[in-house]
Amino acid sequence: MGSVQPVETLTVDQIDLSDIAFWERPPAEREGAFATLRRERPLAHFDEPDLSDLSPLAPPPGPGFRAVTRHADVTEVSRNPDVYCSGRGAVSVPDLPEEMVEYFAGMISTDNPRHARLRRIVSAAFNPRRVRSIEDAIQRVAVDVVARAKEIGGGDFVVEVAAPLPLKIICDMMGVPDSEYATVFRCSNTILGGADPEYLPPERDPILELLGAGETLTGLMQEIAADRVANPTDDLTTALVTTNIDGEALTHAELASFFILLLTAGNETTRNSVTHGLYAVTSHPDQRAAWQADPDGVTATAVEEIVRWASPVIWMRRTVTTDTVLGGEELHPGDKVLLFYASANRDEDVFADPFTFDVRRHPNPHVGFGAAGPHFCLGAHLARREIDVMFRELFRTVPGIRSTSEPDRLRSNFINGIKHLEFEVTGD
């Protein structure tokens, strides 16, 4: 089997996870740095970056954070939300104003009892009939997307294949008209584009750009929600605006926040997993052959391995609420901890040959959807289904599809994204 071995070019004292230059290093060097941290300093402390030169609206640097790099510690934190809370911001290292936390994180950045209430209402909208309808739609969209890929014979896999599937599924679920797909795609890239100049030009204020993208998506959601109140249909937005559990319903602000979460998280993570998947099976032809030879027997484990391999969300933050001990280290109220899922998914103590891509890997207790706990990804089933259906359709219709370039990677410390990846259809 092919593998990508870590290259340990940095000493533990030279590693700085707050420096964007670290995230521009080759993947093998970043993997090497995390291997060093897991072995030598698994709860290393890092200063927070000073973002004032990027925006006058940036909050001042806080007290820094601990990088949680081992699988056992990530799962420990995730299982104890009372000790490690999400309500002070799960997707940002700096503490953000409450309205920004609400805007861009919503359910991710809430704690019980509010988190349980939100999740209960949203989960009720995903009844079995609607889930079956979504799964049928995934199959139809995948067939159309792959047929077009076969017709054009090559191009940018992200643009032509990986992005259209989750984007159309999410937009159709929420009742977003086709005319707004480009807007949703642009805003999603802005919100999760990190420091990448392709999505966030350096001459623009990143915080204003984020707020603008959030405002655009919120406005779109408000229009759709108002229409569904007056003219209910069978989409998820109608279900969300009408679902009432024990007298509780989503507020307009909560609905808009969930909409942003679904459009960004549900779009970006699947898009990147599918793209990483094509690059992985191209780079590891033995694994492609094993998968293609037995799709019914291998697809389930292959999908999990793609999510582990890609680790599309690199980290999430928690904040300590009480004196505690984690991995032998004392932590205190207010301490910030970043759960580095990508590092946990390469933990040598948990995964045999963690740097080997193995489509038959079992067991595979990856944390690519977060670890077990109240914040385990609500859309994990949907993401798994999209990856499953997409690769089955690719292998059925264009079995010789392969990537033909190195990935053009997103400049981000939060999303392990691939912006562009050239592909060709051969031997079909």
Image (cartoon, rainbow, N blue to C red):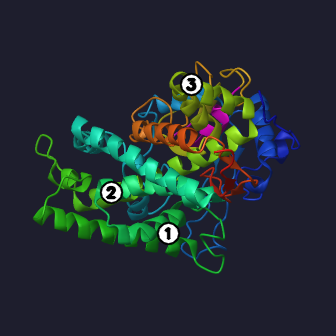
Q: Which residues are magenta?
A: 332-347
Q: Amino acid at mark 3?
A: Val
Q: Position of residue 353 (x, y in %)?
A: 74, 23
Q: Disc 3 marks which residue?
A: 298
Disc ID at residue 106: none
Which image quadrant: the C terminus?
A: top right
**Within the image, what quadrant is residue 138 found in?**
top left
Any part of residue 26 in sight:
yes
Disc ID at residue 186: 1
Q: Is residue 248 left or right of residue 198?
A: left
How far separated are the C-alphas under marks 2 and 1? Answer: 17 Å
Secondary structure under the numbered disc 3 in the rendered image: helix
Q: Amino acid at mark 2?
A: Asp
- Specify few, some or many for label 1: CA neighbours under 10 Å numbering under 14, 14-19, or 20 or more: few
Q: Is residue 376 left or right of residue 341?
A: left
**Within the image, what quadrant is residue 330 found in?**
top right
Q: Amino acid at mark 1?
A: Arg
Of the numbered discs 2 and 1, the one sitting upstream in the chain is 2
> In this view of the protein, which residue sits in the foreground, 128 or 17?
128
> Which residue is located at x 12 percent, y 64 percent?
231
Q: Position of residue 245 (x, y in %)?
A: 15, 41
